[in-house]
Image (tube, rainbow, N blue to C red):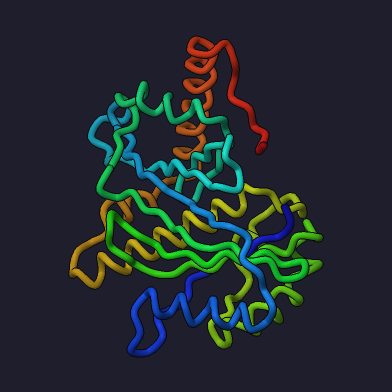
Amino acid sequence: MGVTCVSQVPLAEGKSVQQTVEILTCKLEQLGAEKQGTFYVDCETYHTAGASMGTPGQAGKLLYVMHNSEYPLSTFALFENGPCLVADLNLDVLMVKLKGFFQNAKANKMETRGTRYQYCDFLVKIGTVTVGQSGRGITVEVDYCPCAVPGDCWNLMVEFMQSFMGSHAPSVPPVFSAKHDPLYTPADTMVQYMELLNKIRKQQVTVAGMSSPGGDSAAALSAASISRLTVELHKMAEVMCYVMCNGYVRNIVR
């Protein structure tokens, strides 16, 4: 695990999602990148019930439960603009048990799937974002494997991304500057995916002339509310995991 940048690539003029993906992968292969299997990242949205947290009448907040094929034994739970909880796969079972606190918005499940490429010290993943069977956009994940400090390798990553993304190479991800710990972690990658998938979802909603479901309430979530919700989630997860499997929530990515 090195330093990762996750970004969106717009569709090429007059091209479909699949055709744009083919253009990107062709450029990578011309550079000498080799296919290294496939990958996926998925994201399920849960609405928290305001009344269940002691605030009757308050609009529900959003919790995102995510999985990444690079970490097959882990589940990530994120609040928008909030902390990231890293747990084992029992968290998926817990979310079913906690339906009184978190309700699954099944229509909002998103995922990105595609091909992994290896080029020297870089790992590149180009994925197609889908909701149901509908293609919504393109994600590009670039990992620089030998380094774990974003500031030490960002210029090199930009130079590489420009070689196949051109002017669409991204700027520094906000998560880099928001970090208190200089070392990059898998949770930072999931935060980037959460933010990007939300951005794509809102783009589609805007095009349809609708407001983003829950977007305003999530953005307005105060630091104190995030802290209370996170503490409750930790407590419930620890108790339920111990009861069900005589284990505990592990904050370790395996």
Q: How many marks?
A: 0
Q: Is residue 142 visible?
A: no
Please, is residue 146 above or below residue 225 in the view?
below
Q: Percent from the top left, x then y, of residue 28?
A: 61, 78
- Residue occupying image coordinates x 33% and y 67%: 136
In the image, 163 versus 21, the foreground residue is 21
Quarter occupied by the C terminus? top right
Would you say residue 94 is visible in this rendering?
yes
Q: Is residue 83 above or below residue 99?
A: below
From the viewer's side, name the closer residue of 169 and 50. Answer: 169
Rendered position, 99 above or below 163 = above
Picture coordinates of residue 47, whole percent (x, y) = 32, 39
Q: Quadrant of residue 30?
A: bottom right
- Nearer to the camera, 159 or 114: 114
x and y, in percent, of residue 119 in the image: 71, 71
Q: Is residue 227 left or right of residue 12?
A: right
Residue at 25% across, 69% down: 206
- In the picture as drawn, the residue positioned furthest to the left comes out as 209
Question: Would residue 82 appear left or right of 210 to someone viewing this image?
Answer: right
The part of the image, by quadrant, that contains residue 37 is bottom right
**Quarter-of-image position of residue 133:** bottom left
Residue at screen point 71% across, 60% down = 3
Q: Position of residue 1 (x, y in %)?
A: 72, 52
- Picture residue at 47% right of the left edge, 78% below the top: 22
